[in-house]
Amino acid sequence: MQKTDTFALVGGDRRQAFLAGLLAEDGYTVIAAGLEETELPCRVTGCTNPGQAVALADWVVLPLPVTRDGTALNAPFSRTPILLSDLAESLTAGQRVFGGNLPPAFTAALQGRGVRAEDYFAREELAILNAVPTAEGAVQLAMEELPVTLQGSRCLITGFGRVGSALARLLRAMGARVTVAARSAAARAGAAALGCGETDMAGIGGERYDVIFNTVPARIFTADLLKRLDRNTLIIDLASRPGGVDMEAAAALSLKTVWALSLPGRVAPKSAAAAIRRTLLTMLGEVAP
């Protein structure tokens, strides 16, 4: 079989299955491996051998995240484990591999084989597109966990980047009383422009909140800070690893904490897949460095 504008999608969750279908709708040949335990869209060819799938492809798309343990591909719908080392050996010089949060060691191994490895999770456009489903998913979690409505609830958002600002707009539209804690004076001004209360990080423990949404990917909720929070506060941590909350300290204090990783893929996998598709096609259209 001659390679011609062929994608191989290997591993991943429902985002990868939807992404395969979207790329097939665009007219590409799409082969999917490591997705045996989920339904594949029409026009997508399933393959039980990941090595064979990537050997037939011009472009290989790996999941977000690529791995959870540094050894095996993140492939919850695969019938058998897929080792990153085996996958690397199946790739040949000249191929392009796209992955979300690519491990440095794996990237180096691919580059050593003449394979161009690119991290779509590092792209700004994907971060912007993912902000809305992340915010919607956070609101859904809060509605499931809180004993009260979000309307009138006291909500704190720590950090005011893409996700924080999208979340603030959504919560404000629902009638929540929103305060934003941010280090930057410009970020706090942006929050004030949306009608939110504002504070710096030092003021987090000074007020009572029904729910706290953390978007800062750094351990800001230490044991000392957690002790200053009301015990009925719900904490939803939206930060990527290592997260922003000392989970052991939160558990010891009986603070209800939810670490909500990969929300776009959990609550809106088709929308998340569309965002990845758009990012991939932009990357393919760029001139190689």
Image: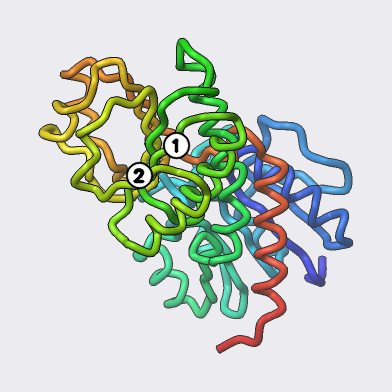
Label 1 secondary element: strand
On the rendered structure, is 43 left or right of 191? right
The picture places residue 223, in percent across and down from the top left corner, at: 13, 32
Label 2 secondary element: strand
Residue at the image position 56 percent from the left and 50 percent from the top:
131
Q: Check the picture and name the quadrant holding the C terminus.
A: bottom right
Residue at the image position 19 percent from the left and 46 percent from the top:
202
Image position of 16 with respect to 184: above or below: above
Residue type indicated by callout 2: Thr
Badge 2 density bin: few <14, some 14–19, many ≥20, Cα 10 Å: many
The picture places residue 238, in percent across and down from the top left corner, at: 42, 40
Image position of 233 with respect to 64: above or below: above
Residue denoted by label 1: 178
- Which is more N-terminal, label 2 or label 1? 2
Image position of 133 with respect to 148: above or below: below
Badge 1 vs badge 2, beta-carbon distance below 8 Å: no
Q: Check the picture and name the quadrant holding the N terminus.
A: bottom right
Residue at the image position 65 percent from the left and 87 percent from the top:
287
Q: Which of the numbered marks, if any, corresponds to residue 163?
A: none
Residue 26 appears in the rendering: yes
On the rendered structure, is 66 left or right of 69? right
What is the distance, in whole Å, between disc 1 and disc 2 at their CAs? 11 Å
Q: Of residues 177 and 127, which is closer to you in this image?
A: 177
Residue 78 appears in the rendering: no
Q: Nearer the viewer, mark 1 or mark 2?
A: 1
The picture places residue 10, in percent across and down from the top left corner, at: 62, 50
Badge 1 density bin: few <14, some 14–19, many ≥20, Cα 10 Å: many
The picture places residue 3, in percent across and down from the top left corner, at: 78, 70
Residue type indicated by callout 1: Val
Q: Which of the numbered marks, if any, corresponds to residue 158?
A: 2
Q: Of residues 54 and 273, which is closer to you in this image?
A: 273
